Amino acid sequence: MAVTIKDIAKLANVSITTVSRVINNKTEGVSEETRNRILQLVKELGYQPNAIARGLVTKKTKTVGLIIPDISNPFFPDIARGVEDSAHIYGYNVFLCNTDDNLEKESEYINALKEKYVDGIIFTSSSIPKHEHIMELVKSGIPIVIMDRRVDSEDIYGVFLDNYEGGYIATKHLIDLGHKKIGCITGPLYTKSAKERLEGYKKALLENGMDVDETLIFEGDYKINSGIIGTEKLLGNNKNVTAIFACNDLMAYGAYKTIRSYGYKIPDDISIVGFDDIQLSQILEPQLTTIRQPAYDMGLTAARMLIKLIEGKKLKKKIINFRPQLIIRQSTKNIG
Ligand code: RIB
């Protein structure tokens, strides 16, 4: 049976708080003799302070929570990698929580992280725009950094991408290649990131004298299957699309599957642009032209921001916006 802080306190004839203070080098008010007696017992009995016990005094457990909506989408492990690498540098552990885009699971995980006394939470919510519970969390005083899916509030710290610019440059690239019939498979339009990418698509069309044809827009859910179905709709409505902007790479992969099942070639018959630039996109045949989100760097930045908040440091900026980058590969062709 592991030695507990209670055993040490009993044997040293002091309180648990005194033992915890000595273990955490908070020894003001503790005599030299008591301090040495406690440290001797800790050494002899091989006591391992547990994170919660340590946290009782320092009020810190050196752990942070990371809540993401879909661990099966490679974009989020890239984020998690950045968070973990950054947290590790500062001596923090990370509890990873996957919500499957489920609001109930999200609330359960928030409570679980509070019970674990995490020092802060990085939050990529699935439930925006219903973000009252996020604002409650912000007001609860636990340091929070929102990332990726924007929450419109003055009170939050966040790390985001300029999704509007991303949708714009993806569509502009296709227009510059001479495409006039460009389909768009969006993400779930309850998320701000999906809405902004669609707005960028529309802006590029209108700015280049082209109409927005709503029959060329299909609402997906960022999963492969919605790319398959959305492309079926776009190919089946006799609109003769020559290009498709899929608002994330997984849906672009679904579009590849459908285009080939219809006997068409990429990019000879149909050009495709994705969004995220997850690792698979550069080894796909043909390699996917896409919009890069610096997911790893966004994760590094979010963790650095959160740890500064936890440690009471002043932050120069509450919101950090990353810029998207067009990565031209082999899935788009000039037809002008
Ligand atoms: O691929 C998943 C999408 O959801 C990414 O584009 C990211 O922005 C997240 O919001």
Image (cartoon, rainbow, N blue to C red):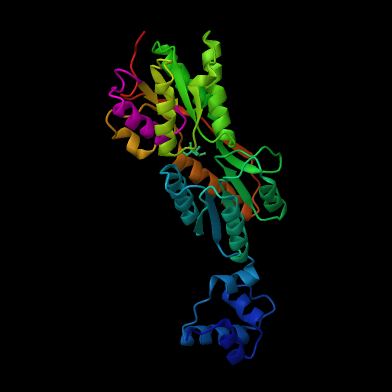
Is residue 76 shown in magenta?
A: no
Image position of 78 (left or right of 207) = left
Where residue 155 appears, as percent x and y from the top left, is 71, 43
Where residue 262 appears, as percent x and y from the top left, is 31, 25
Quadrant in the picture for the C terminus:
top left
Is residue 248 shown in magenta?
A: yes
The image shows a total of numbered marks equal to 0
- Picture residue at 64% right of the left edge, 82% below the top: 16
Span of residues in magenta: 246-270
Looking at the image, residue 242 lies above or below residue 162? above
Q: 238 or 209, which is in the foreground? A: 238
Looking at the image, residue 56 lies above or below residue 120? below
Image position of 61 (left or right of 327) = right
Q: 245 or 312, which is in the foreground? A: 245
Rendering quarter of residue 128: top right
Where residue 106 appears, as percent x and y from the top left, is 58, 53
Q: 127 or 323, which is in the foreground? A: 127
Where residue 84 appears, as percent x and y from the top left, is 46, 53
- Picture residue at 47% right of the left edge, 54% below the top: 89
